[in-house]
């Protein structure tokens, strides 16, 4: 993908993608509730499409059970898909192998496996201890042995807790370093929308016995994907973007990007069901930008590539904490961004493109793309990887950069 157009003055309407996080949780709730959820604005991301296809296969084939050989389910590089399905299949009769891409096999699941084993799950590691691929001997819900309290360590991922929560244990206790808590609270909020009775009290989450109800659910646009448009507006001179189907009071934790980008001179206004962002005049001049900014990514790790690229493009020093779990993402994102931003010491406009490596990571590719506004010409290898979370990103991006291809 080469980007050579530079547009610093624009007023554009942006179609985002439905939240992948919300969509995947709604699909799992439908699975546990035994219905196909009536979801509006379901994400078209690769991860959600994959999860939906697997769940449909499980729902449509009531005897989706391998009598002799385990059924192999390839989750590609979708961590949420593998972790959510791990709990679901642990208590579904049959034998299963959960596997994925080479990178997926480097992403930890040990703490979730440990918690499931305390519930009676039979799970084997087929390779390195604590990592996929996994062989699951599904025991069926009638043979589940539920302790009074299930402990799960979420040091490496909050998805371990969400995976268990969606199956509605009566009492879940969060061990280890707390990270990405807004994603757990999102899980609880969506469960409650489907009539579950759930509350969190610090590290303890309590679920009262209840059935999921088949009610309509509208997925909000994805705030993490919106962050790349905040970066674009921050690099502009008079840029303005209307982000469709987005709300400043969103349950998505990454909605904090609206507050964070105030430091970079980007103003956010709620206008009906949209958020309108603009580069306000008081911060246009480089001299009026902060010299140093501090960000803690403990609860919002997916925003790191966006913020790192924005600081680089605006020549603002960033002091970052809460980066521990970024090495377990689609790439080691701290190392990947350091390597790519090191390719440019300064950002003079040039006709010779700087070639960036996406590291096969959708968020790296999208965070680097707006730097064309500072450099003038860039290329991004394996740019199609954005389909993992924002399939129409390049189509929307071309509204500002008609020469992107």
Image (spheres, grey):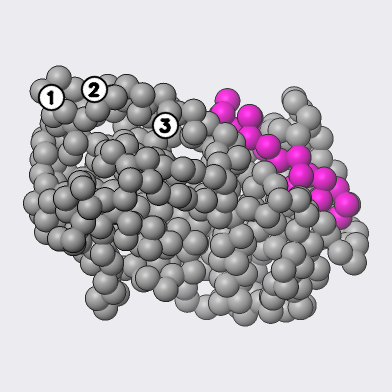
Q: Where is residue 217 in the image (x, y as percent from the top left)?
A: 47, 73
Magenta stretch in the rendered image:
98-119
Dividing the image into 4 quarters, which one contains the C terminus?
top left
Query: Is there CB contact under 8 Å for labels 2 and 1?
Result: yes
Point out which mark residue 162 bears: none
Name the element at disc 3: helix
Compared across the picture, whether 348 is left or right of 271 comes to left
User: Which residue was labeled with disc 1?
Assistant: 350
Residue at x 54%, y 45% (from the top left corner)? 321
Kindly report the distance in space between the C-alpha atoms of the residues bearing marks 3 and 2.
14 Å
Residue nearest the viewer, comparing 157 with 210: 157
Kindly report the distance in space between the C-alpha atoms of the residues bearing marks 2 and 1.
9 Å
Name the element at disc 1: loop
Q: Position of residue 109 (x, y in %)?
A: 71, 40
User: Which residue was labeled with disc 2?
Assistant: 354
- Going from N to C along the chain, the mark reached first, 3 or 2, is 3
Is 118 magenta? The answer is yes
**Mark 2 crowd level (few <14, some 14–19, many ≥20, 10 Å Cα):** some
Is 373 magenta? The answer is no
- Going from N to C along the chain, the mark reached first, 1 or 3, is 3
Compared across the picture, whether 152 is left or right of 264 comes to right
**Mark 3 crowd level (few <14, some 14–19, many ≥20, 10 Å Cα):** many
Kindly report the distance in space between the C-alpha atoms of the residues bearing marks 1 and 3.
21 Å
Residue nearest the viewer, comparing 223 with 29: 223
Residue at x 21%, y 56% (from the top left corner)? 283
Q: Where is residue 39 in the image (x, y as percent from the top left)?
A: 45, 68
Is residue 75 visible from the viewing direction of this image?
no
Q: Where is residue 203 in the image (x, y as percent from the top left)?
A: 74, 64
Compared across the picture, whether 292 is left or right of 129 comes to left
Residue at x 49%, y 43% (from the top left corner)? 320
User: Which residue was labeled with disc 3?
Assistant: 337
| 10, above or below 3, in the image | below
């Amino acid at each position: 993908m080469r980007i050579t157009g530079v547009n610093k003055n624009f007023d554009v309407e942006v179609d985002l993608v439905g939240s992948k996080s919300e969509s995947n949780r709604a699909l799992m709730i439908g699975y546990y509730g035994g219905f196909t959820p009536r979801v509006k604005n379901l994400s078209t991301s690769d991860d959600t499409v994959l999860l939906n296809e697997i769940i449909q296969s499980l729902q449509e084939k009531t005897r989706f059970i391998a009598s002799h050989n385990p059924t192999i389910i390839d989750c590609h590089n979708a961590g949420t898909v593998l972790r959510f399905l791990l709990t679901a299949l642990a208590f579904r009769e049959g034998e299963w192998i959960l596997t994925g891409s080479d990178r997926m096999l480097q992403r930890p699941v040990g703490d979730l496996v440990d918690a499931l084993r305390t519930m009676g799950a039979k799970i084997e590691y087929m390779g390195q201890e604590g990592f996929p691929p996994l062989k699951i001997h599904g025991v069926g819900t009638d043979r589940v042995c539920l302790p009074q309290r299930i402990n799960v360590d979420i040091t490496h991922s909050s998805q371990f807790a969400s995976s268990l929560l969606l199956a509605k244990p009566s009492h879940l206790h969060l061990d280890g370093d707390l990270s990405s808590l807004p994603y757990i609270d999102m899980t609880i909020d969506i469960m409650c929308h489907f009539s579950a009775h759930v509350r969190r009290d610090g590290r303890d989450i309590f679920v009262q016995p209840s059935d999921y109800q088949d009610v309509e659910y509208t997925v909000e646009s994805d705030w993490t994907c919106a962050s790349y448009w905040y970066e674009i507006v921050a690099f502009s001179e008079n840029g303005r973007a209307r982000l469709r189907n987005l709300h400043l009071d969103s349950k998505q934790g990454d909605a904090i990007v609206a507050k964070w980008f105030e430091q970079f001179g980007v103003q956010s206004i709620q206008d009906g069901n949209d958020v309108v962002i603009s580069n306000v005049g008081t911060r246009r001049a480089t001299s009026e930008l902060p010299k140093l900014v501090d960000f803690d990514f403990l609860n919002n790790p997916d925003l790191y590539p966006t913020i790192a690229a924005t600081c680089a493009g605006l020549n603002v020093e960033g002091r970052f904490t809460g980066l521990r779990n970024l090495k377990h993402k689609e790439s080691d994102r701290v190392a990947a961004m350091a390597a790519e931003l090191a390719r440019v010491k300064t950002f003079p406009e040039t006709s010779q493109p700087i070639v960036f490596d996406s590291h096969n990571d959708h968020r790296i590719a999208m965070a680097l793309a707006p730097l064309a506004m500072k450099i003038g010409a860039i290329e991004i290898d394996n740019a199609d990887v954005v389909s993992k979370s924002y399939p129409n990103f390049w189509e929307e991006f071309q509204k500002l950069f008609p020469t992107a291809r």
